[in-house]
Image (cartoon, rainbow, N blue to C red):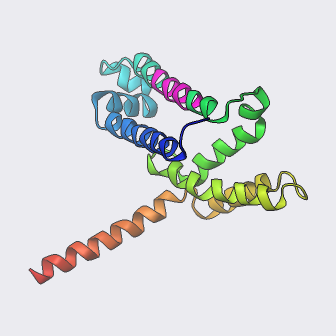
Amino acid sequence: LGVPCSAQLGVILAMLAGVIALPYAISRSKLGYYLVAGGEEPEAAQALGVNVARAKLIAMAMSSFLTAFAGTFWAQFTLYIHPKSVMSLDISFEIAFIALIGGRGSIAGPLLGALLLRPVGDFSRIYFGDKLPGLHLIIFGVVLILVMLYQPRGLQEPLTRIYNRVMDRMCGGREAAA
């Protein structure tokens, strides 16, 4: 690519910050409330004057923008795009597994799923890819089954409970000391 690796890492981290900040900001805006209302009870939201179709269209446009932005960077990073390399069934499954295992309906869930599954997938492809092609998908499937059996809302929910408990103990300890 000709661009130093540290510059690419900076762009990637800036994109990650933007992709995390945008849904966070939207979830606390009027549009975010419209999307929640339209997703749970569209008829009731429309009865209250919410244009559900417009809110969903805006959300889809923002999602498309972020996808195109990431795809543009990916094309510059790899310098080669082929339909099988970016639109294969493996990649579609992997994206779905990341969201399901991490936890849907939150900002941290897919990030957590990606931090867990990407290294596992890369490790299995590097060390077992020539002997057992597709092993990463089997591992993803087993992890998905275990998560759906024991944590149907994803891994983010128990980690949030643990975090809240730790924060309660830390804050409770400060109040008792004061």
Q: Position of residue 156 (x, y in %)?
A: 49, 57
Residue pictured at 71% horizontal, 28% vertical: 81
* Occupied quadrant, residue 165: bottom left
Q: Is residue 144 above or below residue 76?
A: below
Q: Please identify the residue farthest to the bottom as the structure is shown.
A: 177
Q: Is residue 57 above or below residue 170?
A: above
Residue pictured at 62% horizontal, 35% vertical: 1
Q: In the image, 65: left or right of 170?
A: right
Residue pictured at 14% horizontal, 81% vertical: 176
Q: Position of residue 25 (x, y in %)?
A: 32, 36
**Which is more toward the observer, 147 or 76?**
76
Residue pictured at 41% horizontal, 20% vertical: 52
Whether residue 153 is visible here, answered yes or no, is: no
Magenta stretch containing residue 63, yes or no?
yes
Q: In the image, 92: left or right of 160?
A: right
Quadrant where the C terminus sits is: bottom left
Q: In the image, 74: left or right of 167?
A: right
> For the magenta stretch, what is the residue range?
61-71
Q: Is residue 171 above or below residue 49?
A: below
Magenta stretch containing residue 176, yes or no?
no
